[in-house]
Amino acid sequence: MQLINEEAKTYQFLNDMYEDGYFPNYLVDKGKSILIHLCYKIEDVQPSSLEDLYELTNQSTNEFNELQVEFEENESEIETLARDCIAVDFEKIAKIYGFDADIEALTATRDW
């Protein structure tokens, strides 16, 4: 199964994290999978409002909350660079799918 949206298909998710050796690539891969899965959910559900979109993004944010433990176990963490990178990618996904969303609301459930 492939994403329908061409921009989502070619977007380089979490690029800044991949470029920084502080973040283990296999964990960044897991984060990238969370974001790609979010794109699939948006394409499947086709949220009609920001509230519907925020519900989907907050589910994905909760997955990043769980992933934070694995980063810590590998002497890393979702810190400033990672937080910004992840939040910007959430915002980019919203824009790709036609939403003008609040970046804070997209990741409102984060604990990182």
Image: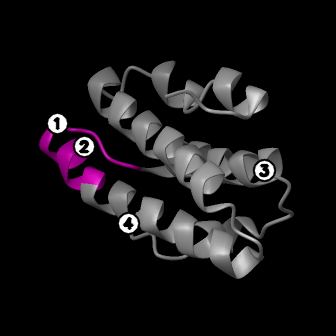
SS of the residue at dot 1? loop
Inspect the magenta stretch and tell me whether residue 75 lies in it: yes
Which residue lies at the image location 44% right of the left edge and 67% below the top edge?
59
Numbered range of the magenta stretch: 67-78
Q: What distance separates the C-alpha of mark 2 from that of mark 3? A: 29 Å
In this rendering, the label closer to the viewer, 2 or 3: 3
Q: Which residue is mark 2?
A: 71
Q: Which residue is mark 3?
A: 97
Q: What distance separates the C-alpha of mark 4 from that of mark 3? A: 21 Å
21 or 54: nearer the eye? Answer: 54
Q: In the image, is 48 to the left or to the right of 83?
A: right
Q: What distance separates the C-alpha of mark 1 from that of mark 3? A: 34 Å
**How crowded is the residue under tag 3: few (<14 C-alpha within 10 Å), some, or many (20+)?**
some
Q: Are marks 2 and 1 in contact (CB under 8 Å)?
A: yes
Q: What distance separates the C-alpha of mark 4 from that of mark 1? A: 19 Å
In this rendering, the label closer to the viewer, 1 or 3: 3
Which residue lies at the image location 59% right of the left edge and 42% below the top edge?
85
**How crowded is the residue under tag 2: few (<14 C-alpha within 10 Å), some, or many (20+)?**
some
Earlier residue among tags 2 and 3: 2
Earlier residue among tags 4 and 1: 4
Q: In which image quadrant can residue 54 be found?
A: bottom right
Q: Which residue is mark 4?
A: 62
Which residue lies at the image location 51% right of the left edge and 18% below the top edge?
19
